[in-house]
Each structure stands twice: as structure tokens, then as C-alpha cells.
């Protein structure tokens, strides 16, 4: 075990951890279907960050009901926006609102040719799978230009997040939540880490540790992306 500002981490995972995690997220009703009239600031920032790359096609892995794609509709009106999620109820809701989204997991990525999408992204998805690397590598493979990961990340800290004993409501952690090392992706692929910015979700629990990590497979100036976060 290790401590991180009150967060307990363990690397002692059971043999069925991956399937158990998938089963939880398939069935859970914890997932909100929509941001409503006032999306959180982090979602707006991520949308502006994606739009700064001017992609013509965007794919979200773990898209929920399409609420992040909804933020992109007005910013990228001519782009193809699509996604996949493991939760069928969320997908049904999103499809009823006209989003191009499907039920599935990481296996769907194998069906995409290399460089299928200008940009792929996740928002707090890889932190709910025990091993992020196969998925991230596939997202990089099918990306033509960029992969954006918005996940909790602390250098040198990895493992499953255990809920603190007697946790208050604002410090509770959903089951199957993990800290991963995403920086290694830039060392094992042809992509470079173009931007790495802290964008907290909330001041408690793992909320302060969320980061936007933009990996680029093309040679571009990072300034438009940095500017998008300060608008």
C-alpha cells in the first residue's frame, strides 16, 4: 500500500480484475446521461482543446451517452463525431439524441485501420480499467494526428485506488478506479507529448490530479492548444 494525500493505492489485483471492472461499468447506473444546461468547466476546456486541432474526425473511447461529443457539435460542425461505450443504457440514450455511438469495448478498435481518425480521446475512462496500455496503444494506432487523454495522473504513483475508511461523500471513490503512468506512451510510440496540463475536476479525492495529456503524431506548434485552455 502507499498513501497519496489520503488516497490509498494497491497493486494487489485479482485474476478477474479486468472482467470484474467491465461488468461493473456495463451495469452501473452511476453514469450521468447528460451535462445539462451547464457543463462542468473541465468538459468545456477539453472541447476547446480538441477543437484547437481542427480535426475533421473525432472518436471518443468511453463516450457515455455522447455528452462530450455534444460539446464538440457547435465547435466542429462539419467534423465526424463518433464514440463507443460499454454501457448499453447510456448508448441507447445517446443514440436517441442523434449521436453516432455504439456499444462496445476496446475490441472494437481492432476493426479500425491505422490512422482512421484525426483525433481520439478519453475523459476519465482509462482510470477505470486495470491496464490502460493496450487501449492507449490502439487509440494511438487509429489516430492520424492526435490522442488526448484526460485522466487522473501522478508521476511515480500507480495502482488501484482504495476508498478511504469512513470517506465523506466528496472523497468517495467508485469501485475499479486506478492511477496509471501515461507518460510512458511517448517513449514506446511514434507520438510525442505535446501538452500536459493540470485541469482539476474538484478539490477533493482524485479530483485535483486530473490532467490533459495531448499526444501528437504530427509536427505542430503547441501554442494554439495552450491558448485554447486560457480562453
Image (spheres, rainbow, N blue to C red):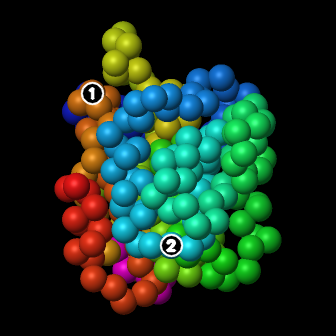
* Magenta-highlighted residues: 189-193
Q: What mark, if any, has residue 185 been given in the picture?
A: none
Task: Name the residue at the bottom extreme.
Answer: 219
State the SS at label 2: loop
Residue on which disc 1 sits: 204
Instruction: Please state the horizontal and vertical placement of residue 138, each as a whole percent of the image.
Output: 62, 70
Front-lying residue, 26 or 216: 216
Q: Work out which quarter of the rendered image holds the N terminus and state it.
A: top left
Q: Can residue 143 be seen by looking at this rendering?
A: yes
Instruction: Please state the horizontal and vertical placement of residue 168, each as a whole percent of the image.
Output: 34, 12
| Residue 93 occupies quadrant | top right
Q: Is residue 169 shown above or below 209?
A: above
Give the residue at x 43% y 87%: 218
Residue on which disc 2 sits: 55
Whole-angstrom CA distance, mark 2 to mark 1, is: 34 Å
What type of secondary structure mainly makes up the magenta span? loop
Q: Nearer the viewer, mark 2 or mark 1?
A: 2
Front-lying residue, 126 or 212: 212
Give the residue at x 61% y 48%: 62
Q: Is residue 130 shown above or below 6?
A: below
Question: Which numbered disc, 2 or 1, marks the residue that appears first in the sequence?
Answer: 2
| Residue 175 occupies quadrant | top right
Whether residue 122 is in magenta: the answer is no
Q: Can residue 152 be seen by looking at this rendering?
A: no
Instruction: Please state the horizontal and vertical placement of residue 86, each as a whole percent of the image.
Output: 72, 43
Front-lying residue, 39 or 23: 39
Front-lying residue, 164 or 119: 119
Q: Is residue 123 left or right of residue 32?
A: left
Whether residue 190 is in magenta: the answer is yes
Instruction: Please state the horizontal and vertical placement of residue 131, each as a whole percent of the image.
Output: 56, 55
Q: Is residue 181 shown above or below 145?
A: above
| Label 1 packing within 10 angstroms: few (<14), some (14-19), many (20+) | some
Amino acid at each position: 500500500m502507499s498513501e497519496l494525500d489520503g488516497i490509498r493505492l494497491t497493486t494487489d489485483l485479482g485474476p478477474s480484475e479486468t472482467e470484474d471492472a467491465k461488468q461493473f461499468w456495463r451495469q452501473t447506473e452511476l453514469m450521468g446521461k447528460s451535462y445539462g444546461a451547464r457543463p462542468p468547466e473541465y468538459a468545456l476546456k477539453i472541447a476547446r482543446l480538441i477543437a484547437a486541432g481542427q480535426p475533421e474526425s473525432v472518436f471518443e473511447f468511453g463516450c457515455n451517452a455522447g455528452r462530450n461529443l455534444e460539446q464538440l457539435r457547435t465547435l466542429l460542425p462539419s467534423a465526424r463525431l463518433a464514440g463507443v461505450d460499454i454501457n448499453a443504457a447510456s448508448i441507447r440514450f445517446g443514440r436517441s439524441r442523434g449521436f453516432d455511438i455504439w456499444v462496445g469495448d476496446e475490441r472494437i478498435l481492432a476493426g479500425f485501420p491505422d490512422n482512421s481518425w484525426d483525433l481520439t480521446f478519453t475523459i476519465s475512462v482509462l482510470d477505470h480499467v486495470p491496464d490502460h496500455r493496450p487501449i492507449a496503444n490502439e487509440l494511438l494506432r487509429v489516430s492520424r494526428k492526435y490522442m488526448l487523454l484526460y485522466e487522473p495522473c501522478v508521476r511515480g504513483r500507480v495502482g488501484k485506488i482504495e476508498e478511504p475508511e469512513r470517506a465523506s461523500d466528496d472523497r468517495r471513490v467508485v469501485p475499479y478506479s486506478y492511477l496509471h503512468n501515461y507518460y510512458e506512451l511517448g517513449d514506446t510510440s511514434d507520438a510525442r507529448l505535446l501538452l500536459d496540463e493540470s485541469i482539476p475536476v474538484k478539490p477533493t479525492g482524485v479530483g485535483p490530479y486530473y490532467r490533459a495529456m495531448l499526444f501528437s503524431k504530427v509536427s505542430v506548434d503547441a501554442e494554439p492548444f495552450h491558448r485554447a485552455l486560457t480562453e
